[in-house]
Amino acid sequence: MRFTVVTLFPELFDSPLAASLLGKARAAGLVEVDFVNPRDFTSDRHRTVDDTPYGGGHGMVMKPEPLLAAIERACEGAPPGAPARRILLTPAGAPLDQAKVRALSAERHLVLVCGRYEGVDERVSELAIDEEISVGDFVMTGGELPALCLIDAVSRLVPGVLGELASTEEESFSDGATLEYPQYTRPPEFRGLAVPEILLGGHHERVRAWRRREALRRTAARRPELIARRRLAPEDMALVAGDPLIFPASRTTVVLAHHPVFDRTGDVVTSSVTNLDIHDIARSCATYGLASFAAVTPVAVQREKIQHIVDVWLEDAREIARRQPPARARRGRQGREAAPAGGTGHRSEALAPVEVFASIEELLGELGRRAGQAPLVVATSARLHEGPGAPPRIGERELLVSLARAPERPVALLFGTGGGLTDPAIALADWVLAPIEGHGPWNHLSVRSAAAIVLDRLFGVRGP
């Protein structure tokens, strides 16, 4: 693997490239690193490589002439059919991840262009750059340290650089979705902390299962967005099914409050129950694996209405089961046997767990009684709530990380009907979830739509 670094400061690379694995890899001829300095392609006595930006502004911009000449020199000597891959290190580039590192390790020659000052003339990218890469959402003084990061990450995947290539297969991000499991070494006990017993037993399969489970738990606690990138494989699901840290939805109850809420004039009212709200939110809860769905109204006849809605669907499911010939089971997808009463996708499966309470306080008390500890309460609102009693606002990722710190506590996710929850109802919460917003001024989603969006953001599989 050959790296050619286009940089104004090649001396920054001396010590890192001479030490540890990179130093050994270079000495063994597995990795080659050379440098081209744009100052060597200037024509004035000051060796000028930057100039003021067109349009005004602070700082200086790297000039295209010397930089393009340096890149062209760096690409010389490439074998036929294998041109150098030209990469600009810039905060404006695509994020560097392990998948990109693996792809780059298959290249034979990488030219790494290190920007400086306020940036690089855009025509350089248009004429001589194949891709732009960033090592994170922050700004550094130049591209040299990011280039070192890329060289180190890619070099580790070059055959022969690591003593045991298999060790790269179990590292963080090796599968693109999980962090590495916790590691331990001697002594077996240190300052009151013991190595997990399972690691001392010598049972390889149990150790493998423990490590995979802990990798998933660590990822859910620290980087929940990685878990959401894709569905877990069946073997992973068998290891962690029902784990409340990995699947916080399994301990979350959606609460649809019809009181106390605002009407369109700002008065505090009790809103009417609608079949559509109960029906659609229950289906969303079932889709994302929530523990339960509870509707709150102080009006007895409205509570009876909710129960009637549920009963209608349960009776429909029972009627379908009665009509089904007992000797001929229906076939599900891929020809598998489908149970006649459960797991059929009938809406009764979503509506059967629906519960009804007279007040939010009654519901929260019942959740706490069942779990043996008070629930974490998260309110949703399209309005800004401020003042002494207002809970802090929290985003989806921060919420998932916070829930991971208390994996045994139940969670109540409050949604208000009508014009939204009142301030006293909001004050019952530990946090207020950041509102759903578009780029326009309209912000009046139905509670059904809002619930579906929030549940998908928190508990859905979103893809990479």
Image (cartoon, grey):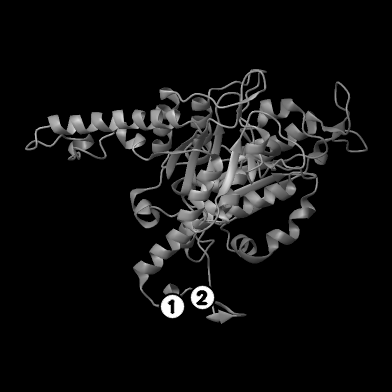
- For the residue labelled by badge 2, is the local secondary structure a helix, a strand or a loop? loop
Residue 347 image point, x, y percent: 32, 31
Q: Furthest-front residue in view?
A: 300
**Residue that numbered label 1 is attached to:** 200
Kind of residue at badge 1: Leu
Residue 333 image point, x, y percent: 23, 35
The answer to the question of whether label 2 and label 1 lie on touching residues, with beta carbons closer than 8 A, is yes
Residue occupying image coordinates x 74% and y 61%: 15
Disc 1 packing (10 Å; few <14; some 14–19; many ≥20):
few
Above or below, 214 against 104 in this view is: below
Q: Is residue 418 left or right of residue 389?
A: left
The answer to which of 361 and 382 lies nearer the viewer is 361
**Residue that numbered label 2 is attached to:** 195
Kind of residue at badge 2: Val
Above or below, 382 against 201 in this view is: above
The answer to which of 424 and 102 lies nearer the viewer is 424
Q: Earlier in the sequence, mark 2 or mark 1?
A: 2
Disc 2 packing (10 Å; few <14; some 14–19; many ≥20):
some
The answer to which of 80 and 53 lies nearer the viewer is 53
Residue occupying image coordinates x 44% and y 23%: 274
Dividing the picture into quadrants, the one containing residue 415 is: top right
The answer to which of 87 and 348 lies nearer the viewer is 348
Residue 22 image point, x, y percent: 63, 60
